[in-house]
Image (spheres, rainbow, N blue to C red):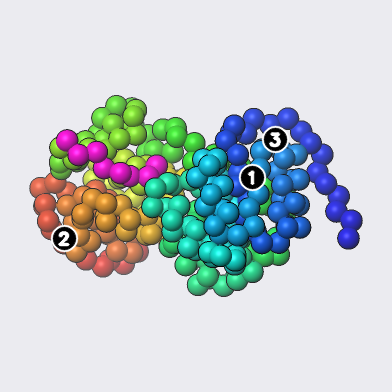
Amino acid sequence: MTVTMPQARPTSPSQRPIVVVDDDAKIVALLRTYLEREGFSVIPAHDGRAALKAIRDHDPALIVLDLMLPELDGLAVQRQVRETSDTPILMLSARSTVADRIRGIEEGADDYLPKPFSPAELVVRVKALLRRSAPTADHLVADDRPTLEHADLRIDTRRYEVRRGDELLPLTLVEFRLLSALVAADGRVLTRDQLLDAVYGLDDVDIMDRTIDVHVGRLRDKLGDDAERPRYVATVRGVGYRAAPADRGAAASEAPMSV
């Protein structure tokens, strides 16, 4: 089969490489060609253990990760990466059901591309993920305050730090953006679509609403928050989320409501 390659054009990608992981050498070579023609540098890997070594050694800007891998599968690799990093992960898989996509997102993927796919579409998704992961305040709910406070939390929007007293909380960039957006809303309820916009910036790549629920769950875990008696993040069922009212302390989540 003859593949017509895209014409190279000037770009300004991150100086950090992209790690591409797939046990099919032809797929890795094809993706490497497409990504390098867009100006990215690519580190290839063909099994789970090699992927982890490449990620440790090269600190990539993004990881393209196949689900089915020898040694360690993609989900195992993803779990280890998520223990210490929020590097964007684009999961590839021949499994394309909604349940498979949800599992990939729940395990820490930022996007999910079913096989077979167009290499050109993968490049578009890579660029979108890199835009979303850029540490700028553009994704936050409009707010020019350098510091936000809620309950015993202090959020430094310039340094991307959240402290509870003297404790620096180990939030990922996505979790930081999510918490900042909720606190900056000053008690207003934010829908999942609004939070997707605040956290990622909406663009041409589909992101499931379920993604926000997963990130809220992880944020609550790190804050030690209880969804039924929230101190920091309250659920408004059928609508979205808001910062838990300070005067309610450990009040329960909002009752179900019709929308």
Mark 2 or mark 3, earlier in chain: 3
Q: Quadrant of residue 96?
A: bottom right
Above/below status of 151 relative to 144: below
Depth order, front residue of 244/57 = 57
Q: Amino acid at mark 2?
A: Arg
Query: In which quadrant will I find the N terminus?
Result: bottom right
Viewer-nearest of labels 1 and 2? 1
- Residue 93 picture location, percent across and down: 61, 65
Give the spatial CA distance, label 1 vs label 2: 46 Å
Left or right for 249, reference 32: left
Q: Residue at x 34, y 42 (%)?
A: 176
Query: Mark 1–mark 2 contact, CB under 8 Å?
Result: no
As drawn, is 30 to the left or to the right of 155?
Answer: right
* Badge 3 density bin: few <14, some 14–19, many ≥20, Cα 10 Å: some
Left or right of 9 in this view: 22 = left
Residue 252 x, y percent position in the rendering: 16, 62
Q: Which residues are magenta?
A: 166-173
Q: Which residue is mark 1?
A: 43
Distance of label 2 from label 3 (alpha carbons) = 49 Å
Asked whether 175 falls inside the magenta stretch, the response is no
SS for dot 2: loop
Q: Residue at x 69, y 31 (%)?
A: 11
Identity of the residue drawn at 29% across and 64% down: 237
Q: Residue 243 vs residue 128: left or right?
A: left
The residue that mark 2 highlights is 229
The residue to which callout 3 is attached is 39
